[in-house]
Amino acid sequence: MSPKDENTMVKNTRGRGRGRTASGKPNPVDIHVGARVRLRRTLLGMSQEKLGEAIGLTFQQVQKYERGANRVGASRLYDLSRVLEVPVSFFFDDMPDEISSKSVHERREMSESPDPFDNDPMNRRETLELVRAYYRITDPTQRKRVFELVKSMGILVADNENAK
């Protein structure tokens, strides 16, 4: 490579690589897909290590996918869908409008706004544990009663907050 070529090359600075926001943060779509991988893996009671073994990765690589630090390629997404027993579209379900409606350029601009996943209850360990415990109830009648109980408690709380 000639010195002239070296001067015209765009250098990739750490944290500002392909698919990253202008501030170097992971792309919000990659974060969403990773959160969906984690959600499904956890609901199945599968460890990162087991998932990694099933698709030929280390658990550290699975961690990076789940955080959105590494992008998931099409073939890897297909493998994940097979191992996690969901359609590929599952990974894009429930994507917030503020992410899905933006162009690539606009998503890069979002880096200064708050992360929409920070307050998503589906990304909390408590939610995942609750869902797993719920599905461990084998009697459909009991499970339906628990569902109705929790639902009614949520309505009561909302009513009390609105009355204040």
Image (cartoon, rainbow, N blue to C red):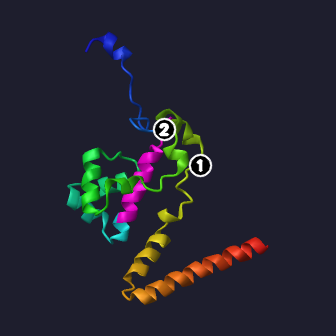
Rendered location of residue 113, percent (x, y):
60, 44
Residue 141, above or below 59 = below
109 left or right of 144 in image: right
Q: Residue at x 53, y 35 (%)?
A: 106
Which residue lies under the disc numbered 2? 21
> The disc labelled 1 sits on which kind of residue?
Pro
Is residue 58 visible to us here?
Answer: no
**Label 1 – label 2 distance at C-alpha:** 13 Å
Which residue lies under the disc numbered 1? 114
Rendered location of residue 2, percent (x, y):
27, 11
Residue 112, above or below 139 = above
* Quadrant of the rendering where the N terminus is positioned: top left
Identify the main secondary structure in magenta.
helix
Residue 21, above or below 85 = above
Q: Is residue 75 magenta?
A: no
Label 1 crowding class (10 Å Cα cut-off): few <14, some 14-19, many 20+? few
Q: Residue at x 44, y 50 (%)?
A: 31
> For residue 37, what is the image quadrant?
bottom left
Tell how many labels: 2
52 left or right of 9 in image: left
In magenta, the rendered stretch is: 21-40
Is residue 75 visible to us here?
Answer: yes
> The disc labelled 2 sits on which kind of residue?
Thr
Rendered location of residue 25, percent (x, y):
48, 43
Helix, strand or loop at label 1? It is: loop
